[in-house]
Image (cartoon, rainbow, N blue to C red):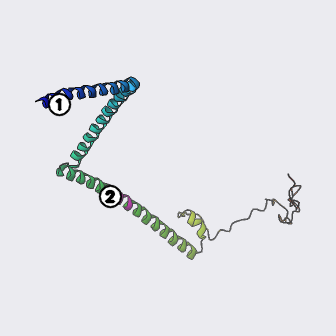
Amino acid sequence: MDRDGELLSARPALETEGLRFLHVTVGSLLATYGWYILFSCILLYVVFQKLYIRLRALRQRQLDRAEAAAVEPDVVVKRQEALAAARLKMQEELNAQVEKHKEKLRQLEEEKRRQKIEMWDSMQEGKSYKRNARKPQEDSPGPSTSSTIPKRKSDKKPLRGSGYNPLTGEGGGACSWRPGRRGPSSGG
C-alpha cells in the first residue's frame, strides 16, 4: 500500500506542476498578445456571421430557383399557347402587309403597262409620246396636235456669241483659268 500512497502523492505534485506551467505559459501569452487575440476573435465572429447570412440567402435563392423550375405543367402549357397565339397574330399582320404591298405593286405595273400602251397608240397615230407620258391627254374639241406646228420665238437673242467655246479660255471676260506653277510647293 505504500506504493499506492506514493503514487497518489506524486500524482498531485505532477498535476500542480503542469497546472503551474500551463498558467505561466497562458498568462505570458495573454499578457503579450491578449489584445490581438481578443480583436482577432471579434473579427472572426463578425466575418462568420456575415458569411452565414450570405450562405443562408444563397440557399434560399437556390430553393426558390428549384421551386420555379418545378412549375406546374399546366402553367407552362398556357404560357407556350399564349406565345404561339402572339406569334400567329404577328404573322397574320405581316401577311396582310405583304398582300397590300403586292396589290400596290400590281397596280403600279398595271399603270405602267397602260401608259406604255397609250404611248404606243399615240406613236402609231403620229403624236408626240413625250407629252403623253407626262400627263394623259384629254379629248378636246380644239385642233389636233398633229396639225399644229410649233412656232420658234426668234425675238430672244442668244446668251453668248456664236464663237464662244469654254474650253479655249477666250471670249469669257476677265476670269480665265490658268494652271498653277509646276514644282515643289514653297513651305517649310
State whether the magenta stretch is mostly helix, strand or loop.
Answer: helix
Return the x and y of residue 10 as percentages of the image width and height. 20, 28
**Of the pair 35 and 70, the residue shown nearer to us:** 35
**Of the pair 181 and 128, the residue shown nearer to us:** 181
Kind of residue sitting beneath label 1: Leu
Q: Is residue 72 visible?
A: yes
Secondary structure under the numbered disc 1 in the rendered image? helix
Residue 82 appears left or right of 43: left
Question: Looking at the image, which residue is at 46% across and 64% down?
Answer: 108
Number of numbered callouts drawn: 2
Q: Which residues are magenta?
A: 90-98
Crowd class of label 2 (few under 14; some 14 to 19; many from 20; radius 10 Å): few
Question: Looking at the image, which residue is at 31% across and 27% down?
Answer: 21
Quarter of the image holding residue 148? bottom right
Q: Residue furthest bottom?
A: 124
Which residue is label 2 attached to?
91
Secondary structure under the numbered disc 2 in the rendered image? helix
Q: Residue furthest front?
A: 2
Image quarter hosting the N terminus:
top left
Which residue is label 1 attached to?
7
Return the x and y of residue 121 as percentages of the image width and height. 53, 74
Kind of residue sitting beneath label 2: Gln
| Label 1–label 2 contact, CB within 8 A | no
Question: Closer to the observer: label 1 or label 2?
Answer: 1
Check if residue 91 falls in the magenta segment. yes
Question: Looking at the image, which residue is at 29% across and 35% down?
Answer: 52
Check if residue 60 falls in the magenta segment. no
- In terms of sequence position, does the residue under pointer 1 or pointer 2 come before the other? 1
Return the x and y of residue 3 as percentages of the image width and height. 14, 31
Quarter of the image holding residue 98? bottom left
Return the x and y of residue 169 as percentages of the image width and height. 87, 63
Quarter of the image holding residue 160? bottom right
